[in-house]
Image: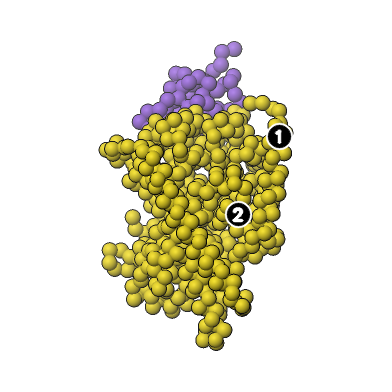
Amino acid sequence: MHAETNRSNIQELLPLDALLQKAAEHKGCGTSSEGGKASCGSSGGPDNMTPEVWEKVKNHPCYSEEAHHHYARMHVAVAPACNIQCNYCNRKYDCANESRPGVVSEKLTPEQAAKKVLAVASTIPQMTVLGIAGPGDPLANPDKTFKTFELISKTAPDIKLCLSTNGLALPDHVDTIQSFNVDHVTITINMVDPEVGQHIYPWIYYQKKRWTGIDAARILTERQMQGLEMLTARGILCKVNSVMIPGINDKHLVEVNRAVKSRGAFLHNIMPLISAPEHGTVFGLNGQRGPTAQELKALQDACEGEMNMMRHCRQCRADAVGLLGEDRSAEFTTEKIDAMEVVYDATTRREYQQVVEQERQATVAAKKAEQEQLSQLADAEGISMLIAVATKGHGKVNEHFGHATEFQIYEVNAKGAKFVGHRRVDLYCQGGYGEEDSLVTVIRAINDCHAVFVAKIGGCPKDDLKKAGIDPVDKYAHQYIEQSAIAYFMDYVGKVQAGEITHQTRGDADIRQGAYIAA
Amino acid sequence: MAFKIVASQCTGCSACEPECPNQAISEKNGVFVINPKKCTECINYFDEAQCAAVCPVDDTCIIDLAYPRYQASA
């Protein structure tokens, strides 16, 4: 580990930063923000960033919003130890229905992880990223983490390596991270002010000592900032994850956003706190609530103008497998993998991914076409709306209302259609009969939307949705989402202008906290 | 002269094992166990017991009162 600063790398960094800023200013789409012109955030495409950066993010489902409709990732739970304690984490709570970071069903050795990667890569050819995110902190288990990277870069060299850490041990391992060609690192940064941090972190373990209170938070933030700077100086793409905790850091996160942007972070992911008493976390037991959907969106919008924001995080488990929002980890337990015939074929994977690329470009082209139509719409009366979409993936409206476990949320206005988030819901349809309680939950979760796009929907939920003021729409079944949203919006504005309907703003919506009702 | 790990509360996270200066901790049936013969309570090594300092679950890595406390030789 040398102490010398590599001046040429830092020189290269400045033009990239300026270029990203220029791109952000040039292309305005969707949301407005207080801090200047909004960029397309992680919905950015090749026009918004340098070719080198685009190459790194275009098929990483977390770093590119577009990519997450088409590409999959997997996490391997090889890092059980952790060097800090957060008030939102309880690692004892493991339930197959629970989707929270820090929770897994099985720990893996590096060798088991390598086997799992090959099994998944052959079954899910659009899987492009292997991440180590837990269940503890990867850099509190450096031997296991780097051994796993070593094995996978040998046996499956086309897979991108990714890492998520609290950052405390990060400065000690940046060189090793770079030597494995890890392109993407995520740091969870919830504060830059130790006064705020002391309410989030009861203790850290650093240099053979347990630290508490403000001292602990101060050390943590210093190390996180140092680690972030070291990574960006080496051209490693850094995403920052922040947990929004109302009353503790909700206002402070704007400061965090500025601080990480100035140190070269590529993407900021602000996520809602997950907190319920049955999780057994300090926050859960103390009744600390997570943010509402509108609170979360308002904060994300406020930060949008300053740097790229990620809005599609599913807060997945440290052993999650598959497309974001569609966890297939149950198919890949150690038992099941042992029983599998694993044939790793790099050629098939590459060909499949080429097909996926074409599909992705078709989606983009469809959106552009619809966007052009929209720009001809003289006056949209300043109307903006949210639309909930039931989708299985591939950027289309292709899921039945009753089978949706989550709805993707798109914001549409005169500037176009933009993905702004998702809402988890219980499964409404239980083997042919709808569950009444679940429908109430669904309506609460998408209450701030004007419409819900589905491939199909039954009569009963249709009526209840209409009563709640949400328009159930199945006429765009199996069509591209953004294209359909814009078409619907243009119809809607036409009706408003003709006086057929009056536009009303919607109320707020809930973010699901507890376990799924059904398996 | 020992710490012990309450097996029913141990999550098996393995954070304690590498921190022990006496290599007194090992894995058994998915949880971790301290060998009371090797444990010196970190006296003369560190200001605080390392295994307890790093353990994520409160009241899990604790003094085992079944044993006499460790006496460092003078």
Residue that label 2 marks: A47
Q: Where is B39 relative to A358, above or below? A: above
Across and down, in percent, residue A195 comes to 68, 47
Residue at image location 65% in from the left, 65% down from the top: A32
Q: Tell me which chain the residue with mark 2 is part of.
A: A
SS for dot 1: helix
Q: Nearer the viewer, mark 2 or mark 1?
A: 2
Q: Amino acid at mark 1?
A: Ser
* Colour chosen for chain B: purple
The amino acid type, in three-letter code, at marker 2 is: Asp
Which residue is found at the position 43% from the left and 22% from the top?
A: B35
Q: CA distance from mark 2 to mark 1?
A: 26 Å
Are the numbered discs 2 and 1 placed on the same chain, yes or no? yes
SS class, disc 2 = helix
Crowding near pointer 2: few (<14 within 10 Å), some, many (20+)? few
Count of numbered marks: 2
Q: Callout 1 environment at 10 Å: few (<14), some (14 to 19), or many (20+)? A: few
Judge by depth and name the residue closer to the eye, A174 or A158: A158
Chain A as rendered: colour: yellow
Q: Where residue A455 appears, x then y in whole percent?
A: 37, 68
Using the image as rendered, state which of residue B66 and residue B58 is in the foreground: B58
Q: Chain of mark 1?
A: A
Residue A290 is tagged as: none
Circles 2, 1 touching at the beta carbon (< 8 Å): no
**x, y percentage for residue A380?**
60, 77
Compared to residue A71, the image places residue B28 above or below, namely above
Residue placed under numbered mark 1 in the picture? A8
- Quarter placement of the C terminus of chain A: bottom left
The foreground one among A401 and A211 is A401
